Amino acid sequence: MPRSRTILLVVGFGLTAVGGYWLARSAAPARAARVEVAVPAAPGTGAPEQEIAFRHGERPEFRSDGDALKAGALPGQRALVFKDRAALERFLAKAGGRIRILGRIDSLNALQVGFLNPDDLAGLLDGTEEPSMIYPAYVPNPKPGIIQNGVVAVGNKLLSVVGITTDNSNWGKGVLVAVLDTGVSPNSAFGGKVINSINLVPMPADLANWNGHGTAVASLIIGNDQLTPGVAPGADILSVRIADDLGQSDSMLIAKGIVTAVDAGAPIISISLGSSGDSPIVRSAIDYANKAGVAIVASAGNEGMAQLAYPAGNTGVIAVGAVDANGTVMAFSNSGNTLAAAAPGYLVNAAWTGDQAVGFTGTSASAPIMAGAIAAAMSSGGSTLRSPGDAMNLVLANLNDVGAPGPDAATGGGTVDVGRVMNAGTPGIYDAAVASNYIIPPSAEVPYPQLQVVIQNRGTEMLVNAGVLVTTAGGTVPLNITTLMPDAIQTFTLPLPSSSWNSTSPLTIDSSVWLTGGRTDSNPTNNRRVETYVPPAN
């Protein structure tokens, strides 16, 4: 008899439970049971040394720690990065008891210092070190009402949503993925896999208070059951606890976590929390990881802003946004020109503490799905593992275009398709897909609305003379694709009647594509896309 697990509906990066119901692993839910979790207000050693990129800017003035408060940073603390170990030791010898040493990262030649009077610290600096603020980081929630109508939950269908249709139980084998989060608790979803842990933040005295966010993140990588499946169950997880049970962390802990994961030998790091502050100490840790060949994946953030959270917004990090089961961009998902890709992030089934399961919502879910895809790609290179960089490039080269044609700030290069990644070297695959029906509103240049129908070749063979049919309020239009290379897109732009835009009635768009010449489409489920668009009220 399969053991029951509670499933909670989690919103935000994944912190807040807003409802729940009992699910057996292989049975339908029997009846609902509500669960409420209080939401806190947002708060405020090393491997052999290697040369770290050293940034030196203008030395800040420490007249009062209003500087930190104004920047949204933690008052009375700074991070200091020194040009070498000798400079760090000279500083310590000079400092004496004038300041307090709160922590250090030897691999970065960095210190975390505390002080009562900023002038005490200012008097110790000689201009060769790099001081920086320490910013709070946390697991926030989407703003109220920011989840739009009509989006489709992923549930336990994660594998099919990301293109996995075969046994993936060994994907990721031999790959260690570091999860920098609230820690990872044991869960039956992991199939008995042992989780190695390094706690940079103390565990709760009562484990019943353990925040399950990190457990949920890990399960989207290594989950190995029907209720909470993961992308790369064969991978191993290194849990690095950098956030407490209120979901709170800071930029120094993020930097420590990155260095700890690198020094422990993890080729992939997944980070599902963020900060509004761009921290030099975190940038130094990212440099350290990048020089070691480690791939860092981070959540874009859930504020619905045209600005990525940090470290997702930093160079050298793979930033991931959120879409629903149909590839629709979630309104809470932050956007930006450096966003790499998008992955499912709406009510994705995931594990939780207490052997429970949750419906995980937020870009917190999207980042580990990308990390799992990279782990799977690393393990698919034959007798030897691919490098993290090669695996990352393979994943990014096989994204599914969605929304506006080509790369865009909302979805990067497109959504993760692990099935395409694992079949990238297999010849003879024909797969024509309607990638999106994208509406361009009227403008001064073009006074009527336009429809862009995007067709993508998601197979490994060139498409020849594929047929396309588009039906809108303006009628039915037959189209043709002469040739389309693998991964390429072709965009058809069609005018829409002005009346369809001025009307309050929904606009239905029905687009389809089919192969000719006796070719069989390997995935006919993506050959047609029917969508209803409601013009804005104004």
Image: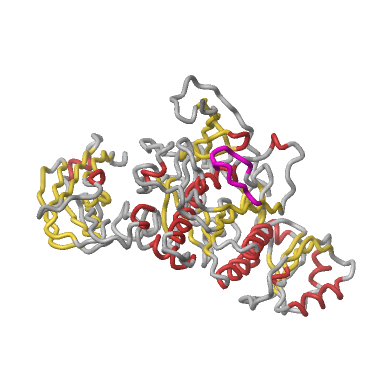
Q: What segment is highlighted magenta in the picture?
A: 185-196
Colour scheme: secondary structure
Q: Is residue 213 above or below residue 83?
A: above
How many marks the image carries: the answer is 0
Residue at image x 15%, y 46%?
470
- Specify whether residue 441 is in view: no
Q: Where is residue 237 shown, x and y percent of the image?
A: 58, 52
* Residue lying at the far right of the rendered structure: 97
In the image: residue 179, left or right of residue 31: right
**Would residue 190 be counted in the magenta stretch?**
yes
In the image, 220 versus 377, the foreground residue is 377
- Describe residue 146's horizontal placement relative to residue 529 as left or right: right
Quadrant in which the C terminus appears: top left
**Which image quadrant for residue 238?**
bottom right
* Residue 11 location (% of width, % of height): 52, 38
Percent of width and height locating residue 510 = 19, 42
The chief SS type of the magenta part is loop
Q: Position of residue 10 (x, y in %)?
A: 53, 36
Q: Name the residue: 55% across, 47% down.
A: 218
Image-based side of 151 in relation to 183, left or right:
left
Q: Nearer the viewer, residue 261 or 498?
A: 261
On the picture, is 453 further left or further right than 72? left
User: Which residue lies most toward the front here?
Assistant: 383
- Which residue is at the far top? 31
Residue positioned 73% across, 45% down in the render: 203
User: In the rendered view, would you say 54 is above or below 117?
Assistant: below
Q: Can the viewer see residue 144? A: yes
